[in-house]
Amino acid sequence: MANPNPNNEVAMKIKAMLEEGRPRFTEECCIYRVPHDIRKHNEDAYTPKVVSIGPFHHGNQNLLNMEGHKRLYCRQFIERSETKNLESFVSCVQEVEPKIRGCYSEDIKLSKEELIMVILVDCCFILHFLLEIASTAIGGDALFQTRRLTNLIFSDLLLLENQVPLFVLEKLFLVAFPSTLSSGTGNHINPLLLLPALPVLPDKTITDDNVEQTLTNVGRAAHFTDLSRKLLLTSSQLFQPSGCSREGKVMHLYSATKLNELGVKFKVNRNSKCLLDLELSGHTLRIPFTKVDDITEVVLRNLIAFEQCHCVHEAYLTDYITVLDFLINTDKDVDLLIKEGIIENWLGDSYAVAEMFNGLGVNILSSDFNEKYSLIFKSLNDFYARPWNQRMATLKRDYCSTPWQTATSLAGIFLLILTVIQTVFSIFQGVH
């Protein structure tokens, strides 16, 4: 009997292996592992501190303390619901399990049953937590006795790797409270789900008067990270479908102090609450107000990571960080922007603020750039290159950099003028 051809056996094994191949990303994919070359610069900014949400960090030993509280909140949410039927909640998640699995950028090793359990518990925990936050009379739950713990949970809910699809939260809320469907506003997002984004938005971005319009403008959002980004950017003309072109180019831009030496003025843009709305009028650059605190870096890093993974051709927030990275090189640049009311520093150290902005752009790719910012860069660079401005900057730097130096320079000029006058009078006396 002839021996089987070993090449055929290898070919069959390779064929079986190739048939196991699956696309890494699906059309539903929206929740990503932060790329290693970005993540390595600040691991803590992308890792949950107290609570795991979704499959990526499920089972993390450092987060197990909250598992019991998550299950408690899941049970309490079902008990407070109009339905009060666990099977209804399980069926809701079970129906969309394949779609949920496709939302994650990595192959989820959990079985179908395990994933349903994780998503159900995590989503019900989030909904109950938000309902408690929204309540005017929070009970004696120890979770709310420590403001720091509550803030850490909000921070964890904004991390890119720590997400569940928003449509699952919406479905479960309707299962729990079907009466809200008949009284709904027709918006895609339940107002309750806006709560995690509120701590990172400028004051009065969302009010009782404009919440409906805000929800309409945002439209659909994939998860809390995406929702926070859209709420931050939605009021800007750059972010609108008819916004400016993204065919601009990134070019070098001098720091705020160097530009200021040449006469460029920096003012806070009080006409806009959107971070993106940079405006150049003459040689005055207006920048919207921003508060820099302990959560700022975490929020910005995760929003930028989401843009890098999901919407690199609409990376408007990355554009903004690119501008700030150029303008801020040292603590002196930060001090200038603080003085003009553009930055409010809650970190206490201007150097820490400079270090933060300089670190945000490391290993970030810019496939394109919005044209409005490119025109601002060009105008400021042209202003910087004018010889007269250069000479005036040198004069200011060498002779008027401090009040004492300015006084000394003026005294020297005054003495020079007196000397010239004395010389002229001496010449006239000699002539006469």
Image (cartoon, rainbow, N blue to C red):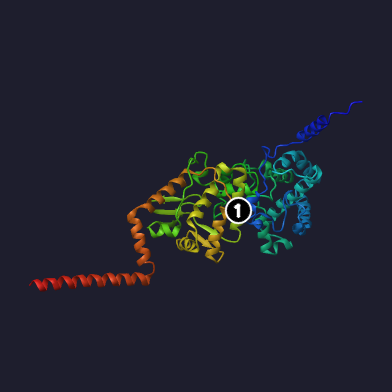
Q: Position of residue 93 (x, y in %)?
A: 76, 42
Q: Position of residue 424 (x, y in %)?
A: 16, 70
Instruction: Identify which residue is drawn at 46% across, 45% down.
Output: 372
Quadrant housing the C terminus: bottom left
Say if 292 sits above or below 189 in the image: below
User: Viewed as shown, does residue 287 lie left or right of 422?
Assistant: right
Among all residues in the image, which is located at the extreme front? 2
Instruction: Identify which residue is drawn at 33% across, 59% down.
Output: 391
Secondary structure beneath dot 1 equals: helix
Q: Position of residue 341 (x, y in %)?
A: 47, 61
Q: Please state which amino acid type lies under the numbered disc 1.
A: Arg
User: Viewed as shown, does residue 273 lie left or right of 89?
Assistant: left
- In front of the other: 4 or 43: 4
**Snapshot quadrant of residue 202:** bottom right
Does residue 411 appear anywhere in the picture? yes
Instruction: Identify which residue is drawn at 75% across, 47% down.
Output: 119
Q: Position of residue 295 (x, y in %)?
A: 61, 59
Quadrant housing the N terminus: top right
Q: Which residue is mark 1?
A: 301
Say if 148 sits above or below 221 in the image: below
- Rate crowding at label 1 as few (under 14), some (14 to 19) or many (20 or more) other CA atoms within 10 Å: many
Instruction: Identify which residue is drawn at 79% across, 47% down.
Output: 117
- In front of the other: 15 or 134: 15
